[in-house]
Amino acid sequence: MKRFCLALDLIDDPESIKEYEGYHAAGAAWPEVTQHDIDCGILNIEIFRTGNRMFMILETGDDFTFEEKAKMDASNPIIAKWEELMWKFQQPLPWAKPGQKWVLMDRIFKSGL
């Protein structure tokens, strides 16, 4: 299993954040999107928020790659609609590449436990 940690900011507006969280409440995410994630090799997703900063943990199968997921995303019109909707709430981190949403984080510490 692989684990990836990513970050993204939301537009800093309490009502917008509340609406965004509504799309991610238990059972509220579009089933086609969650199935697509499974089809891409994602085993588990957790998203945490503090203020308008979000932190996502992806757990994937060993053969998962972001390149393959991007190809699968590009060929799925439901994913395009979901991502267009989510951009309404999201804003890139200042150091993100043009068009980049979630930015892969570098691990800088791991305990021996």
Image: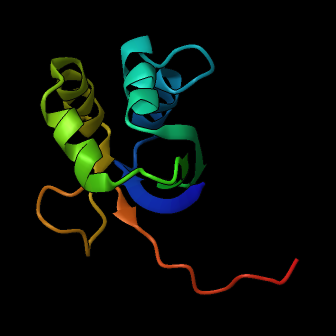
Reply above or below: 56 against 84. Answer: below
Reply above or below: 56 against 22. Answer: below
- Please, which residue is most extreme toward the right here? 113
How has the structure been colored for display? rainbow
Residue 31 location in percent, x, y? Answer: 44, 13
Residue nearer the viewer, 92 or 109: 109
78 displayed left or right of 47? left
Q: Is any part of residue 89 visible from this angle?
A: yes
Residue 8 location in percent, x, y? Answer: 39, 57
Reply above or below: 6 against 46. Answer: below
Name which residue lies at 19% across and 22% down. 81
Residue nearer the viewer, 16 or 95: 95
Assign the N terminus to one quadrant of the image: bottom right
Name which residue lies at 45% across and 39% down. 41
Assign the C terminus to one quadrant of the image: bottom right
- Please, which residue is most extreme toward the front here? 63
Residue 84 location in percent, x, y? Answer: 19, 30
34 displayed left or right of 75? right
Residue nearer the viewer, 83 or 71: 71
Name which residue lies at 41% across and 50% down. 64
Name which residue lies at 31% across and 54% down. 66
Res 112 → quadrant:
bottom right
